[in-house]
Structure formats: C-alpha cells, structure tokens
Amino acid sequence: MLNKYLMDNPAKFKVEVWSDIMCPFCYIGKRNYEAALSQFADSDQIEVVWKSFQLDPTIPTPTDTSKTTLQYLSASKGMSPSQVQSMTNGVTQTAKNAGLEYHLDKTLVTNTFDAHRLIQLAKTKGLGDMAEETLFYAYFTEGKDIADHLVLQELGEKIGLTAEEINEALTDELYAHQVKKDIQEAGQIGVRGVPFFVFDRKYAISGAQPPEAFLQTLNKSFGEWEKDNPRIKLDSVSGPACTPDGNCE
C-alpha cells in the first residue's frame, strides 16, 4: 500500500507565484510562464502555488467607479494624461503579444483584498489557477469590479465554488489571514514587485519575463530538484488489496 501511495502521490516541484489581480504584468507573466511550461518536458511534475500580494492596499472600498485607472495612474505616478496613455498603450500591446486582450480604459481602481480571499478558498479546492485566470480576465478584459461581492459571487460560481463557500471566504477571517500571511511572507523573502516567481525556493524571476527566461529557469531548477527527488518507478505485482475508501478487491 505504501508503494502504491508513493506512486500515486509523487513529490511535486513547486513554483510559487506572488501576484495581484490589478497588476497588468501579472497576467502577462502568467501567460509567458504557461508558454514556457508548454515546452517543458516534465510539466506534469510541476505544482503552481498562487500567493497573494497587494500593490495598493490603501484603495478604499467600495470601488469609486467615477475614477478611472488612467486618472489614478496619473495622480499616483505624477504623470501627465498623455504620458499615462502612452504607457498604457505599450502595456496593451505587450499583452496582445502574449495573446491577451486588455481594455485598460475600462478597468477600475479596485481594492483586491477580497478577490484574494476568494483565491485562497479556490486553492483549497485545487482551483487556484482557474480562479486567477477568471479574475484576471474579468478585470482586464471585461472591466468588472472585482471588489464587488456580487461580482465575486458570480465569478466564484463560474469556477465551481458554491454560494455558501464563497460567502464563507468573504466573511471568515481564516481566508483574510491567509492573504495577510502571503503578503508578510513576500516581505520576508524580498518581494518588491509582482509578478514574482519562486522556483523550489532556490531561484526567482521578477517581472513578466519572456517565455525563454522561464524555460531556462525551469530546466535548471527542476534538474537540480530531480537529483534530490528521484521518481520512484517500481516493477510491482498487483493482488487483492483494500483502499481507504472501503473498497476491497
């Protein structure tokens, strides 16, 4: 039984990603990483763990829908509207190159804390990656207010969570604690901006690097990890056995 468990539950190589939903480069970084992973021979051995991060936790809730992202960037960065427009045009083109459709003129200045609470819940169901993808798309492509609990309810149910589970995520302090824990951990390991990818707690990539950079780091870090975690390949003979779920055959 132990041998079967080891075969069915092999150790996974972890890639941890600190990210914020309102960060345009985080979605681009996700796509570039996925492009690299599609070229990686041992992609089935990789486990991605999404970590919470907030670029601006001071943004008030509920969302001020009268304030556009362009106005927010102009004020926070001390840039003229034309400079901000030029910058966002560049980001939109970079996103397009990664296969994403951005509508930054529609995005809202939103506090993402509750969206991260939803992601923390999704992670416990094995839906972390789907939650990230759904929230990114809702924010950057559809221009939805991801601080609005009705919107989070809709998006959570879309990825397979129940209304009761979503309500718990948005009210139970357990999920708020997990968000704060991730943010605190980011500070401890020196994360200053996102996206921030950590490979087996040995190597890191900061920013939305091109797929080639991700692939290079995957090959190097996974190769080192695999030496310390050789896959168990047993030549076994099967016979009558019982499983924890009560099946004996």
Image (cartoon, rainbow, N blue to C red):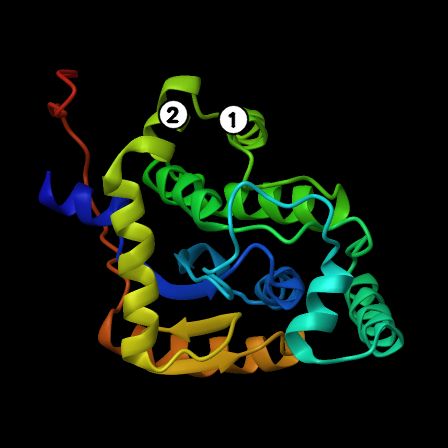
Q: Name the residue under label 1.
A: 153
- Dot 1 falls on a residue whose secondary structure is helix
Amino acid on which disc 1 is placed = Gln
Where on the picture, by quarter, is residue 247? top left
Splitting the image into 4 quarters, where does residue 92 fall?
bottom right
Position of 190 with respect to 101 (left or right) is left
Query: Element type at marker 2?
Result: helix
Along the horizontal axis of the image, is 114 left or right of 239? right
Name the residue carrying label 2.
167
Q: For the C terminus, which image quadrant?
A: top left
- In the rendered structure, the answer to whether residue 188 lies left or right of residue 123 reads left
**Whole-percent x, y for residue 81 in the image:** 85, 72
Mark 2 vs mark 1: which is more N-terminal? 1
Mark 2 residue type: Asn
Residue 18 sits in quarter: bottom left
| Residue drawn at point x = 39 percent, y = 65 percent | 16
The relative height of residue 94 versus residue 138 in the rendered view (above or below) is below
x and y, in percent, of residue 56 in the image = 50, 64
Q: In front: 205, or 35?
A: 205
Q: Residues within 10 Å of mark 2 (few under 14, many from 20)?
A: some
Name the residue rendered at 59%, 66% in the picture.
33
- Quarter holding the N terminus is top left
Total marks drawn? Answer: 2
